Amino acid sequence: MTNFICITCGTQFGEGDGSPPACPICEDERQFVPQSGQEWSDMASLGQEHEVIWNEEAEGVHSLQISPHFGIGQRAFLIEGRDGNVLWDCLSLIDEASKGRIAAMGGLSAIAISHPHFYSSMTEWSAACGGVPIHIHANDGEWVQRRSALLRPWTGETLSIGQATMIRCGGHFDGSCVLHCPWLEGGRGALFVGDTMQVTMDRRFVSFMRSYPNLIPLDAKAVTAISEAVRSYRFEAIYGAFPGRTVESDGNGVVERSAQRYIKAIAG
């Protein structure tokens, strides 16, 4: 029995003696199935050709990414905190080197996931780190492909994880979340946004989409709701889902200006 992994989106599925007939996440309009068709891998095969690379982004913030590129290519984050370390978003591969490094750093207290595209191998990561809880928003529970007692679906608009706060913003998915960590950036705060917001190439704005690969925009109401959801939280930096996509300063102002620019652009 194998836990197959979708090569296109990187999602790990429940055990089976053959590959799944399809990947529901890729068949949704927010993702895609390649013209070549659906292909599958597994954890052991990934580990033969890939590794997890680490980068210290700032004090207490470490990004993790699969190399060479795999799946969507997102970065996850290990965030150090006095209440325990939190893994924000996840990767399809967990290697032995990462297991050892996390253990040496004191392990994890929780895993928090922004949205279904980054569920990846979240159950495998939790099990490898002592069975820590995996926090996903219940509104997106239908997209879970590997069920586990380690999952902690939550409802409502915010969830406290020690000093950190998960904030449901909606938009990209109904349960799309960001993570606010007020102790980072010298106490000025940081926001980890997954795909709820996308840090733009110039690193001076963020943007918002229902589907990034298929270029389906959000409407003004959804974008306004996202900006309002984070308005009361102070944050200097914004950490996006992809390498280098980090806003280093004036994070609150960036979100406000970005929402205004976006809404003006779609107003006609």
Image (tube, grey):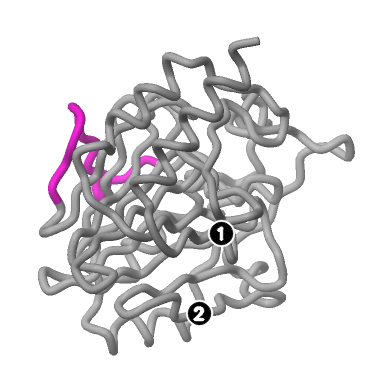
Q: Which of these two is toward me, 95 or 210?
A: 210
Name the residue furthest top.
268
Quadrant containing the C terminus is: top right
- Location of residue 244 in the rendering, given as x and y in whole percent from the top left corner: 58, 65
Picture residue at 32% right of the left edge, 61% below the top:
126
The type of residue carrying mark 2 is Trp
Q: Is residue 132 magenta?
A: no
Q: Is residue 123 visible?
A: no
Q: Which mark is residue 170?
A: none
The magenta segment is 147-160
Picture residue at 45% right of the left edge, 27% below the top:
173
> Circle 2 — which element?
strand
Q: Which mark is residue 54?
A: 2
Q: Is residue 114 visible?
A: yes
Q: Is residue 157 magenta?
A: yes
Mark 2 Cα shell of 10 Å, populated few (<14), some (14-19), many (≥20): some
Q: Position of 188 compared to 51: left or right?
A: left
- Location of residue 190 in the rendering, given as x and y in whole percent from the top left corner: 31, 59
Residue under label 1: 245
Looking at the picture, does residue 133 appear above or below residue 99?
A: above
Quadrant of residue 98 within the rendered picture: bottom left
Q: Nearer the viewer, mark 2 or mark 1?
A: 1
Picture residue at 62% right of the left edge, 29% below the top:
211
Q: CA distance from mark 2 to mark 1?
A: 15 Å
Quadrant of residue 140 within the rendered picture: top left
- Location of residue 101 in the rendering, given as x and y in whole percent from the top left corner: 37, 86
Picture residue at 48% right of the left edge, 44% below the top:
14
Which numbered disc, 2 or 1, marks the residue that appears first in the sequence? 2
